[in-house]
Image (tube, helix red, strand yellow):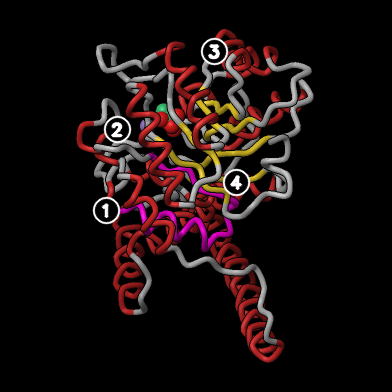
Amino acid sequence: MTTIFENIKRPLLIAGPCSAETEVQVLETATRLSNTGKIDLFRAGIWKPRTRPGSFEGIGARGLPWLQRVKEETGLPVCTEVANASHVEMCLEFGIDVLWIGARTTVNPFTVQEIADALKGIDIPIMIKNPINPDLALWLGGVERLRNVGLKQIAAIHRGFSFSGEKIFRNRPQWQIAIDFRQEMPDVAMINDPSHICGRRDLLLSVAQKAMDLNYDGLMLESHISPDEAWSDAAQQITPEVYGELIEALVLRKETFDNPQVLTVFEQLRKQIDLIDDEMIHILASRMKISREIGQYKKDNNVTILQNSRWKEILDKFLLKGSQHELSEEFVTRFIKAIHDESISQQEKVMGDDRVI
Ligand code: PEP
Ligand code: MN
């Protein structure tokens, strides 16, 4: 077990109920998951951080022996969430193989530090979920706190980010944050948690597939013997058999091409992309140069930087042209807003004065 995140078996498959509810439920879920042959690590929440009091807050320490029984009867290693030092102690006492820090805990450096301190000198694998807010530094900081006490077997779990507004996902994936995480810490295994991203069953496969396409190291999925009756997160859980089908349906891809002819064509396409990227930078630089000239005119004539009607005209034009070229409205909006933002900053620099009050 000590090498679960080193020489990782890819994809590492973690599954189990959101919450341990009864001994029978835990054992039956584990047995049926084990029968699919598609699980490496069994999960079950023992202490549940719930948004509002009054919901089921976890079975507590009396569920820990149930996890021990899962190990004995299925041979699967087990993991659960810890949110403070006393959880850590109890898990160590009951031989839990892997721990994870939940999203609501990652946001709090004091608590992550408390958990790290409780693990000082102990070589146990630990996973850390992204914080609920889209803050890469906080996620990386959590890993640093664990590393600082000497923990070596660390994985990150990408479970999406809270947001308000219209929802398809329960937690917006914001894939770029996980991609940025991997750039910063390439040696930390990255596991995707489609269950908490989706919050609903029908999207699980597409999110899990996307994670595989983005070369994630593993998946964590919630599975329950009677999903609709689950005491927490019912809408996103699937039976062990449906879980087995989902994993079976995933297309697993290699990181490189093995056919040299295909590789040559592919590399040519990449060269074309590189050329276009170079052009893009030049075009953006020319556009900003003109913005600075415009800034100078506005300054000389005492005109505001932002004119709402002009900005609306640009945005509408982009949206129309984008839609004619198969570009999503979301992308075009983000793209032109980023350019506009930079253009305003460049003009501000031209207009700026050094008065201090
Ligand atoms: C969970 O895994 O059941 C859980 C509480 O997840 P998160 O910390 O991602 O909300
Ligand atoms: Mn859950």
3D distance between C-alphas at marks 2 and 3: 22 Å
x then y, percent, for residue 178: 56, 47
- Which residue is more in the foreground, 158 or 72? 72
Queried on whether the Cβ of the residue with tag 2 lies below 8 angstroms from ligand 2, the answer reads: yes
- Numbered badge on residue 190: 4
Q: Residue at x 48, y 52 (%)?
A: 37
Amino acid type of the residue that numbered disc 1 sits on in the rendered structure: Asp
Q: Is residue 211 magenta?
A: yes
Residue at left 38%, top 57%? 246
Instruction: Give the residue number, with chain letter if any, for mark 1.
Output: 202
Q: Residue furthest left?
A: 228
Q: Residues within 10 Å of mark 1 (few under 14, many from 20)?
A: few
Q: Amino acid at mark 3?
A: His
**Circle 4/circle 3 CB separation < 8 Å:** no
Q: Secondary structure at mark 4?
A: strand
Q: Secondary structure at mark 2?
A: loop
Q: Which mark is residue 254?
A: none
Cα–Cα gap, marks 4 and 3: 24 Å
Residue at 43 percent across and 11 percent down: it is 62
- Horizontal and vertical percent position of residue 219: 50, 48
